[in-house]
Amino acid sequence: MSVKLKAAKGLLSIAVASSTLLAACGVNSDSKTGTPAKESKDSKPYEITMALMTFNNLKDIELVQEEISKITKEKINATVKLLPISISAWNQQVNLILAANENLDLLVTMASRNYSSQVAKGQLIPLDDLLNKHGQGVKEAVGMDLLTATKVGGKIYGVPSMRDLAADYGISMRKDLVDKYKIDLSKVKTWADLEPIFKTIKDNEPGITPLVQQNNSQTPALKLYNAQFDLLGDSMGVLADAGNDLKVQNLFETKQYAESLELIRKWYQAGYILKDIATSQETGANLVKAGKAFGFLTNLKPGYEQQDSAQAGKEMVAVRLTKPFMATYNVTSFMMSIPKNSGNQEKAMQFMNMMYTDKNIANLISNGIEGKHYVKKSDNMIAPLPGVTESGYLFNQWEVGNNYLTSVWEGTDPKIWEQMKAFKESAVKSKALGFTPDFEAIKTEVAAVTNVINQYKIGLETGTLDPSLLPEFNSKLKAAGLDKIIAEKQKQLDAWVKAGGK
C-alpha cells in the first residue's frame, strides 16, 4: 500500500532550527567509518526507502532525495527515496505499511510511538550484527552507552539521533504578545505563575487561545509530571524519583499526577486551554502560525527558541521551569530502525552509517540544497535565501542522523553543540537510564491496560475530564492488570541492576 501525504505549507522564519558543525568525517572505505568501498558499476543499484515524520512543508523533498542519491549511488550503489508521513497520520500509516509487508528499509522509531510493541511484534530487526559489519561510523558517533539504552531483550533495535538527549520543561510563547502586554517573564517560577499570563491573553486577544497542545500525543499535564518521572517506556509503571530511587510505582496514584490534573482542569475551565484539545490533530506550532494560539507547554533544550520560531513562523520565547533530566526515553524518543520489510538490510545499514558520518548527507537531510533552500554565510553558518519567505524544505533535523555534522542557521549561537553537550552533562540522570522493559510476558495485560488508558488519559490530561474520575480510572487499570505490569517491570529492573545495568 503506497503512502502519499502532503506536508502543510510553512513560513520560513529568519531564525531556523538549531544545528551546527562540530566535527566532520567523510565517508570512505576504511574500517573507522565502516562504509564499504564502491561496488561494481555493473550491479543494479538498490532503492532505499526511508520513512520520516513531518510537521512542515517538504514540497521539494524529491529534489533533496535526488541530491542525496547522487552521493549514495557513488558510495554504496544505492538511491534513496524519502517517504514523508505527517505526524497526525503517523501511527496509522506506519502500522499499515508494516502490516502489509510493503518494502520499507529505514523507519524513524520513537518510544512514544510503539517502539517496544514494534519490537515485540517482530516488525523491527536487531541491528547488532549489521552495526558491527557496516555501522562502525554509527557506533563511533553515538557511543555504545547510548546504543545500549535502546536495547530490548539484550538486542539493539534502534539508533538514536545525535541531538540534545536531555530535556528541561517549560512553555513556548509568542514574543510579540509577550512584548505587547509587557509580561515580565522573570516572575514566572512555577507552572501556576502562568495563570495571569493566560488571563491577559484570553481577555485581550479574541480568537487566540492562551494554551494549546504541543502535538496530539503531548498533553499539557504530561509536561508537568514528565519533568519528574521516568516513564520506563510508557506510563504503565514509573519511577517517581528517578534520580534517586528504583521503585516502580503506579503513575496514576501519585500525588504529582493528581496535582497536575487539578491544575490543568482549572486552566481548562477558565477557558485558557483549547476547547477541543482532546481531539485536535494540529500541532501547537501550526496553531501559532495560523494566529490561533499564544503558546504551548513543551520540552526544551539550548537553542529551542530558534527551532520553535522556524516551526511556528513567528518569533517565540521560552520560560524554563524545571532542571534538565535524562532518562531512557530521551535517548529513544527519536531513533532510526530497520523494519523486517526491508528488501536489503545491509544497504539500509550502509546508508544509516552515512547519516552519522557524511557531512553532505547530514546537511541535505537536515537543511535541503544549498542555493535552493539556504545560502552559506561561512564554513559552518547558513541563512535563508534573500527575499524568500516560504521554504520548500523545512525538516525537523533532530529526528535523524548526526546533527553535530550540520551547519548552523544564522541567528543561532555558533557554539550550540558545545552548549548542548554541557546541557546533557548537567542533567539529572535516571538511575534506570538504559533500561527498556520487555512486554512479552505481560502483553495481554499491556493490551488491556492500554485500552483503559485510551479511555481516560487524554481527557484527564487535557482538562476536558474532571479529575474526580481518577479513582474510577485507577480501579479499571487494576482490573485490567496494571499491578501485574508494575510487578513485572520491577522484576526486570531489579535483574537489570543486578547484571550491571546492561
Image (cartoon, rainbow, N blue to C red):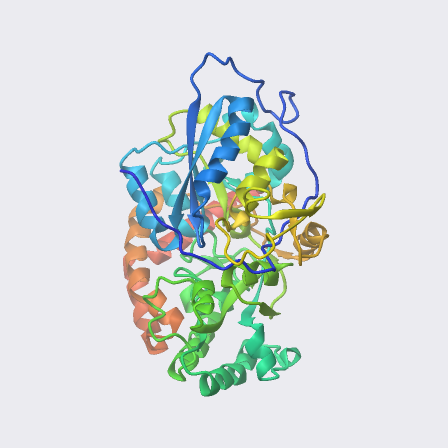
Q: Position of residue 305 (x, y in %)?
A: 60, 63
- Observer able to see residue 414: yes
Compared with 416, 162 (above or below) is above
Q: Quadrant of the C terminus?
A: top right
Q: Position of residue 50 (x, y in %)?
A: 43, 37
> Image quadrant of residue 94?
top left
Q: Position of residue 265 (x, y in %)?
A: 40, 78
Residue drawn 49% across the image and 21% down it? 77
For this rendering, which residue is in front, 67 or 34? 67
Compared with 438, 35 (above or below) is above
- Observer able to see residue 502: no
Figure label count: 0
Q: Quadrant of the N terminus?
A: top left
Residue drawn 49% across the image and 66% down it? 223
> Image quadrant of residue 228?
bottom right
Compared with 3, 289 (above or below) is below
